[in-house]
Image: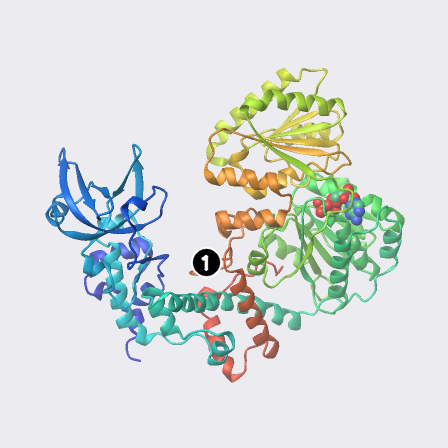
Amino acid sequence: MAQNGLDMDIQFLPGVGPKRAALLKKELAVGTIGELLKLYPFRYIDRSSFIRIPDIRPDMAYIQIRAKVLRVDIIEKKRMSAWVSDGAGELELIFFKGIKWMFEKLKPGLEFVFFGKPTSFNGRINIVHPEVDSPAQGTAEVSGGAGSMTGVYTSTEKLKNGGITGKVMNKLMEAAIEKGLPYVEESMPEHLMRQCGLVPIHFALRNIHFPKDMASLEKARYRLKFEELFYLQLSLLKQKYIRSRAEHGIPMPRVGEAFNLCYNSLPFPLTGAQKRVITEIRNDMKSGSQMNRLLQGDVGSGKTMVAVLTALIAIGNGFQACIMAPTEVLAQQHYKNIQKFLQPTGVRSAILTGSSKASERREVHAGLEDGSIGIIVGTHALIEDNVIFRNLGLAIIDEQHRFGVEQRSKLWRKATFGAPPHVLVMTATPIPRTLAMTLYGDLDVSVIDELPPGRKPVQTIHATEGKRPALYKFMKDEIAKGRQVFIVYPLINETEKLDYQSLEAGAEEIMQKFPFPEYKTAVVHGKQQNDVKKFNMDAFAAGRADILVATSVIEVGVDVPNASVMVIESAERFGLSQLHQLRGRVGRGNEKSFCVLMTGHKMSKESRHRIELMCATENGFELAEEDMKMRGPGDLEGTQQSGLPISLNIASLAKDGLILNAARDCADSVLREDPTLTSDRNQLLRKELRKEKYQIKDYSKIS
Ligand code: ADP
Ligand code: MG
C-alpha cells in the first residue's frame, strides 16, 4: 500500500480545509481519517419518526416534528420567534443567532422538519435553536445510506461556531468512510469472529456511523465493544499467564503449627466466606507460582483475620511476613488487633512506622535481619533501604490504592529467596466486578461477601435541618446509654476554606448544645498537628469523649466498637462509596447502630438518588455498582489515582458487563491454548496487542 488512506489529514476532505481541520484537532483530537472513523456517534436520531406537538413534554430528550411555519417575529433585533403548526398543535421556536438567515429561510406556509430539545419557559414549552431541515432531508434520504437513523457526534460550542454542525459531521463521516474504509484492515481473526458471532470490521464501521437499521447497528456496536474489551482482557491475561510461568513463587506446602495454634484458639468460628478465601490463598501459596491476589471485603467483614492466618502460613514454612498499612493510625491498629491472635502461637511480631524511636528501630532492624521477628506491621517505613529481611515470603498490603508503584517496587527488592514474595492486596473499597476485572485483570480476586454473624444492621435515616433538635435529643439518649457519636463534615479541596468554617461552626454548636463537663466533645481535622490529632482521636477511641466532630479525613478503618451513631453533615456532597465507608465506622459493636444523613432541602436528582440508595441497602457491592452507573468508572472512589488502564472508546464497564464476560472468556480460551500467542492463526492478535492502546500499565505487579 503506497499511501495509507487512514493517515490522510482530514483537511483534505471536502469542506474541511486547514482552519476547520485545526478546530477539529483542537476540540476532538481528530487529525486523520483513521482517527475520524473512530469517533463514534454517542446517539442516533430516528429521522423517520415525528412527535405530535400536543404530545411534547418539557423533560423529553431530543425530538423531531414536521410542521408548517405560521408566522415569524424578530424581537428587538435580538431574538427571533417562529410559530409553527403540525395541524395538531402549535409550538414556538426561538433563535438568538443567525437570525437574518433563518428569517429568510422560514417563510410562512413552508413545511420543515425541526429537531431539538424542548425546554419550558414561564410554563410554556418551546425549542431553542432547533435544527431545521427540509422535509425531504428529514426522512429517508439521509446522507450516507438508506437508513433512517442519523448519528449524533460529540460537539462543542467552538465547533458549532466554526460551522461544524451535526450535518457537517455526517457529511465528513460519509467522506471518511468512502476514502478510509477500504484501508481498514480486519482486526479480529477469522476463527474468533466465527466463534463469537462478530460482524466484519467494515460492516461494523459503516453501520456504527450510518446504520442500515436497528439490527445492523446492534451488530456493529457489539462487534466494536467486544473487540475493545477482548484486547484489553487479552493483554491483562497474557501478563498473568506469562508471570505464572516465568516467575516461580516460593513453594509453601505446609500449613504449619503456628496456623493451627491460632486457628484452634480463635474465639469465634470463621465465616464461610473467610474459610473459602483462606483455602484460595492456601492453594496459591503451595502452588509453586507466585500469589498475586486481591482480597475485597466490606468494612468489618473480617479481613484482618484472613491476613493473620495467611501470615502464619508463611511463618509455618519458615518465612517472614509483612503487613503494610497506608497510615500510622491504621498500622497501629492492625498491630494491636493481631496481638491477641498471635498470642497462642508464640510468633514474635513488631511494628515499624515513621515515628518509631531510633532505639526501637535498631531493635526491629536487627530482628528482621536475623529472622527472630516473624511478622512485621508498618507503614512506608518498612520499605526504607536499611530494612533488611532474612527471608521475606509474603507481603500483605492493606488499602492498596494509596501505595505507589514505586513504593511497591522497593518492597519487591527485599526478596532474598531468589523468588518474589507472595502478595495479598486487601481493600475495603468494593469495586464492581467489571471494574475489578479491568483494573486488576491479572490479579486473582477473592471476595468476602459475608459479615460475621451477630452483626446488627445499621439503620440509615435521611433528615433535613428541621429535624436537628430531634437529632440532638436522639444523640443525648444514645450517649446516656453509654454510646458514642461521630459527626462528619465534608472536606473538599475546592471549598476547603468554607468547609473548615462549617466544621468549626458545627463543633461550636455541638459544644453549646452538649455542654462540658456533662458531655465531652473531641474535634479532629487535617489542619491539626499530628500529636493533637492523635490525642483527640485516642480520647474518642478510649471512650473519654462522647462525640467526635471530624472532617471526612477520619481514618479509613478506625475501629471504635462503642460508637453507635454516625451523623454525616451535608451528606449530599459525598459520593456513594464514601458514604458507605463512613457508615462502616458504626455497627461494629453489639449495639444497634444508626447512620443519619443530614442534607439540605434542595438536592439534585442524583444526590437524592444516592441518599435513597444509602437508606435502602447496606451492601457495598450493590452501592459500588450503582455508583459506577451514576458516575462512570473513572470517578469511582479509590480508582482516581490508579485510573483505568486504558480509556475505552465505545464499551462501558457500567453497562457492558455481559460483553466483558464473553470477551474475557474468549481471551482466556485463546491463551489457554496458546499462552504466548505463537501459533499462526494468532499472529493477528499479537500484532493488535502491540498497538499503543493496549499497552497496559501493570498496576498490580510489584516490580
Ligand atoms: P475488616 O478488616 O474486614 O474491616 P476486621 O478484620 O477488622 O474487619 O473484623 C471486624 C471485627 O469482626 C473484628 O472485631 C474481628 O475480630 C471480628 N471478626 C472477624 N471474623 C469474625 C468471625 N468469623 N466471627 C465473629 N467475629 C469476627
Ligand atoms: Mg480492617
Residue 125, placed above or below residue 210: above
Closer to us: 387 or 677:
677
Quarter of the image containing the N terminus? bottom left
* CB at disc 1 and ligand 1 closer than 8 Å: no
Q: Position of residue 29 (x, y in %)?
A: 33, 57
What secondary structure is marked by label 1? loop
The local crowd at label 1, few if under 14, some if 14 to 19, many if 20 or more residues have their Cα within 10 Å, is: few
Q: In this orientation, does residue 362 appear? A: no
Give residue 4's position: percent from left, percent from top.
30, 74
Q: How is the image coloured?
A: rainbow
Of residues 690 and 589, the one drawn nearer to the viewer in this rendering = 589
Residue that sits furthest to the bottom in the current view: 680
The quadrant holding residue 425 is bottom right
The image shows residue 234 at horizontal and vertical percentages of 54, 69
Q: Is residue 506 visible?
A: yes
Task: Identify the residue at image location x=76%, y=49%.
Answer: 376
Q: Position of residue 282 (x, y in %)?
A: 77, 62
Q: Looking at the picture, does residue 170 appear above or below residue 407?
A: below
Question: Mark 1: which amino acid?
Answer: Ser
Relative to 523, is 494 above or below?
below
Picture quadrant where residue 292 is located? bottom right
**Which of the 4 quarters of the picture holds residue 551?**
top right
The residue pinned by badge 1 equals 647
517 sits left or right of 88 in the view: right
Q: Is residue 666 above or below residue 367?
A: below
